[in-house]
Amino acid sequence: MSNPNKTLLVVEDDPGLQKALRWAFNDFEVVTAEDRNSAIAQLRRHEPQVITLDLGLPPDAGGASEGLATLQEVLGLAPDIKVIVVTGNNDRENAVHAIGLGAWLFFQKPVDAELLSFIVERAYTLYQLEQENRDLSRRDIKEPMAGIIATSPQMLEACQTVEKVAPTDATTMLLGESGTGKELLARALHALSPRAKERFVAINCAAIPDTLLESELFGYEKGAFTGAAKQTQGNIEYADGGTLFLDEVGDLPLPLQAKLLRFLQERIIVRVGGRKEIPVDVRVVSATHQDLSELIKQGGFREDLYYRVSEISIQIPPLRERQGEAVVLANYFLGKEAAQQKKGNLSFSSDALAAIDAYEWPGNVRELANRVKRAVIMAEGKQVTARGLELAATETEPLPLNLREVRVQAESKAMLQALSHAKGNVSRAANLLGITRPTFYALAKKYNLDISQFGT
């Protein structure tokens, strides 16, 4: 497929939502379809790069069989296309099944057009990269958000914050557990900044002995200590013009914290054993898995330094809080590792997908990547099982007989509760639910909710 235009196919049987989505994507040529046959016809005619697919299509509008069948047929005709399946809040099992069949990710109703637009744009960017046969080396591509896969609202919010902050010179703190992707986001901050053509220098403050850390950061003069045979630049000076990433900054010893604070205030360094003041223009990005507020109370971290290194703070959620994202990431790692190990087209078994979705992932994305890599290396058949991932098989709950009715009841209840909490203010109620005001009214009409009782 080689359509030069940005084309999005919306497969949705609800005319109101179909119309709303048509106008939500200004940068795309949007075409629509209401069932499987029309979807395939539009696919052949317009060759879209991205598809949003409601799983509840006629003649099985209350289930997912027709939507899943459409997904399989679409990917059979265009395996590179990015399909975003749209599901209800209680439809996780089918969403996971869709990911296993090859969907790029799933998005839960009610649809927030702004958030979905951001996701579609990311899908299109990824499609372009893959069309250049570079998908297996995305971490090496000079693309701002390369290597970052975000589908959950929490992670998307972190990515959006990175994109807003990147063009500035604000010192930025990335907070999150080990393995959540702090360095990837730090690299994205650099790649999106005016400093992108200069160096990105990373130093792990916890991995270098205290006795060496000062010279690593600030450099040293010849003869400053035994073994200092020549004048040597430190990482701060080496990053001049670019970005310095201080990973695990909470592990900095107190004497070095004072010296780092002076640099941040004056943008001048003095090498170990030297007296010459050297001006350095560098953007500082820090990261830590520690609670710096608690460290400050214990006297382990300077409060004045904290305010210097965290003009902007970005919280990176642990994988266990990124709903559905573990399955998306697992499929990405599976494809990458299978290609590298020359294992062909491996896929996850249903018990593996359920286990991935249910596991807490204490080691976050790093643990997930390592487990998938090991499972691919050890795999003997065409599928990776829960046992291959060394995860306990999980029993999945049976689906209700009428999933659409369950969805209507759950969303109706949530909307009425939000209205009650907002004292009848529809805009506030919509914000509480994470949707737009027009979407709130559209859903209220669809579900025949009497919102007049709240005085709206």
Image (cartoon, helix red, strand yellow):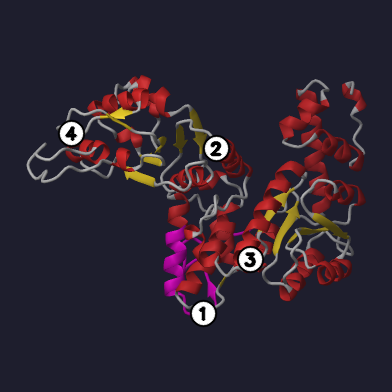
| Labels 1 & 4 near each other (Cβ < 8 A) | no
Reading the image, the residue beneath label 3 is 100
Q: Which residues are magenta?
A: 369-397
Of the image marks 1 and 4, the number of the one nearer the N terminus: 4
The residue closer to the viewer here, 4 or 411, is 4
Residue positioned 59% across, 58% down in the render: 328
Relative horizontal placement of residue 440, taking residue 250 as reference (left or right)? right
Nearer the observer: mark 2 or 3; the answer is: 2
The residue closer to the viewer here, 3 or 300, is 3
Which label sits on residue 381?
1
Of the image marks 3 and 4, the number of the one nearer the N terminus: 3
Give the CA distance from mark 2 to mark 3.
Answer: 37 Å
Which amino acid does the dot numbered 1 rest on? Gly
For this orientation, the residue located farthest to the left is 226
Reading the image, the residue beneath label 4 is 272
Of the image marks 1 and 2, the number of the one nearer the N terminus: 2
Residue positioned 25% across, 28% down in the render: 277
Nearer the observer: mark 1 or 4; the answer is: 4
**Residue 29: image x %, image y %?**
82, 56
Give the CA distance from mark 1 to mark 4.
Answer: 58 Å
Quadrant including the C terminus: top right
